Image (cartoon, grey):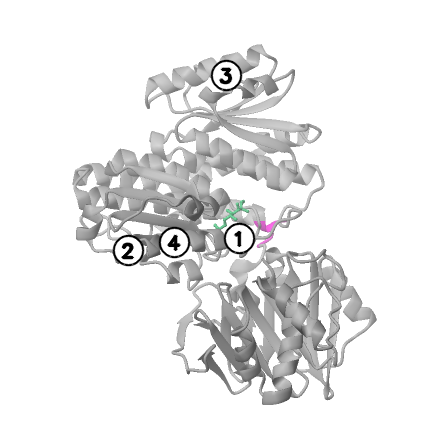
Amino acid sequence: MCGIVGYVGSRSALDVVMAGLKRLEYRGYDSAGVAVPADGGLAAAKKAGKLLNLEKELTERPLPAGTTGIGHTRWATHGAPTDDNAHPHLDNAGRVAVVHNGIIENFAVLRAELAERGHELLSETDTEVVAHLLAEEFSVTADLAEAMRLVCRRLEGAFTLVAVHADEPGVVVGARRNSPLVVGVGEGEAFLASDVAAFIAHTRSAIELGQDQVVELRRDGVTVTGFDGSVADVRSYHVDWDAAAAEKGGHDYFMLKEIAEQPKAVADTLLGRVDASGALTLDEVRIPAAELREVDKVVIVACGTAFHAGLIAKYAVEHWARIPCEVEPASEFRYRDPILGSRSLVIAVSQSGETMDTLMALRHAREQGSKVLAICNTNGSTIPRESDAVLYTHAGPEVAVASTKAFLTQLVACYLVALYLAQVRGAKWADEIRAVVRDLARMPGEVERVLETMEPVRELARSLAGKDTVLFLGRHVGHPVALEGALKLKELAYMHAEGFAAGELKHGPIALVEEDLPVVVVVPSPRGRSVLHDKIVSNIQEIRARGARTIVIAEEGDETVAPYADHLVRVPVTPVLLQPLVATVPLQVFACELATARGNEVDQPRNLAKSVTVE
Ligand code: M6R
């Protein structure tokens, strides 16, 4: 949700900031803008629409050169995506410029106060008040960092703010509360960004910024303080992926690259989780085994695709560890006053580690005395930092808005946690756990095999580009897979797509079925509970009898479904609980190809952002 970059050093600030914004465009692409203190003043440019529009503007009307600068790419909250509402926002004298990610909840009150004091606000945004407040405080303190601290104490809500002032041309100041901001430290230069991707080409040395902290960047150093002015401890870390990992690697879209990377992502997430005896060793899970033995309920909170991973995890937690498990969209969780206690284990699943709904859910859980375990892909992000323990997925950077490799690795992490709970509680024998671990170790190869056979799926997707609706059905773990298939199609192809538990169809949704309606059916393994398989075969017959065009995803060797499939997609034989790892892949390819055939932007679908840092 909005990407922010700041730079101070000896290079062209505009070059660094624009390259950084390109890397962050996945966070929002409603408008973009930059500001550079130069020649005793402040130069700024901003344009509605994608970064390309700003690039064009800068070519037609270049800004003066400078070595300090800030930039912003926006996902609109307050005010439409227009030039006026684009960031940076300046004070009336044009001496201070600020960019912002998040929502300032008390902006209306502040705006009224500023208007009373004679300020003229030109946009509909909540951000603009900050530029005016900073100008007022700077006129007294002549110190941008101090002005920022004073202003932040008056703000309510969630925000990352980054500002420059014409009178302090070698300084960039940032602040954060409930919204991401990382510092990059180079030789004689420093960076600020919503995500390390923005500066990874220049430095891999990063600093985590804590809650309610202000950072002052100068060429010769970085100073971090609390909003109250106290000097803060600085925790630095090394970023363990490089710039090449964030490039498209020869693929047309990041999404295609990320789909192709899934075998490696799954393998990397499994790495180092088992000791010589075959027992699981989840070193990062710092919750003592004795406490895990006492857990009487697992609650999984997550959003979107991560929520679907949680739905699948429920089957594994209950089947392997025999602990009751609830799964809830994080955005609903705290508002229903959930029953939690010290024996509840809450698992927060998030690729970005910054999703506000999930963050708020985990805070609520901790307030109730529950332990929180994060499953996360982004090192140093807020959700793992605020959790009691974390299990990192190793998908590498996921740039496409539609989540793919992160989902598969979230599944792997969920399976590992479920098995670990079974191990510490003695719910499964050691050899049973070893058998599942061996099955998991086979999965990267099986995902690879699925990827090799995707051409017919792509062809089918292209042939359906003119359709309005696609339904997805599944049973057992196939139900969340169906939900995920529908979500992918909605967000990428902008089609009406819905996922159902196949057995629910006859309770209403079957009325949607009409001649030639494409219905994707995820068929459970016939080697699992045979009753499930038989039931779904009946479900397929029911919809076919009403004219549906059936697209059946079934395991190799399952011949009973073949007569009822208009299109048959084969996936490798896997244990029942692990089938989502292979069955989801054709649905990702299907949605990506359909979106391409409909001329949609695959990596940056309309109205969306990769990281949703507002509630
Ligand atoms: O970063 P997170 O995993 O917390 O993000 C959660 C959802 O916003 C995310 O999975 C979203 O649903 C994806 N765009 C779906 O492809």
At numbered mark 3, what does the secondary structure look like: helix, strand or loop? helix
Question: Quarter-wise, where is residue 314 in the image?
Answer: top left
Q: Tag on residue 285? A: 2
Q: How far apart are marks 3 and 1 (CA)?
A: 35 Å
Where's residue 530, x and y in %?
Answer: 34, 18
Q: Distance between the residues labelled 2 and 1?
A: 28 Å
Task: Considering the whole magenta stretch, tell me its main secondary structure.
Answer: loop
Where's residue 455, x and y in %?
Answer: 58, 33
- Kindly identify the residue that appears in the image at 64 percent across and 35 percent down: 594
Residue extent of the magenta highlight: 249-254
- Nearer-N-terminus badge (2/3): 2
- Nearer-N-terminus badge (2/1): 2
Residue 262 colored in magenta in the image: no
How crowded pointer 3 is (Cα within 10 Å; few <14, some 14-19, many 20+) is rated as few
Dot 2 amino acid type:
Val
- Nearer-N-terminus badge (3/1): 3
Disc nearest the viewer among 2 and 1 = 1
Residue on which disc 3 sits: 506
Q: Distance between the residues labelled 2 and 4?
A: 20 Å
Q: Tag on residue 364? A: 4
Q: Tag on residue 615? A: 1
Does the beta carbon of the residue at mark 2 sit less than 8 Å from ligand 1? no
Dot 1 amino acid type:
Glu
Dot 3 amino acid type:
Lys
Q: How far apart are marks 1 and 4 (CA)?
A: 14 Å
- Kindly identify the residue that appears in the image at 36 percent across and 44 percent down: 338
Q: Tag on residue 119? A: none
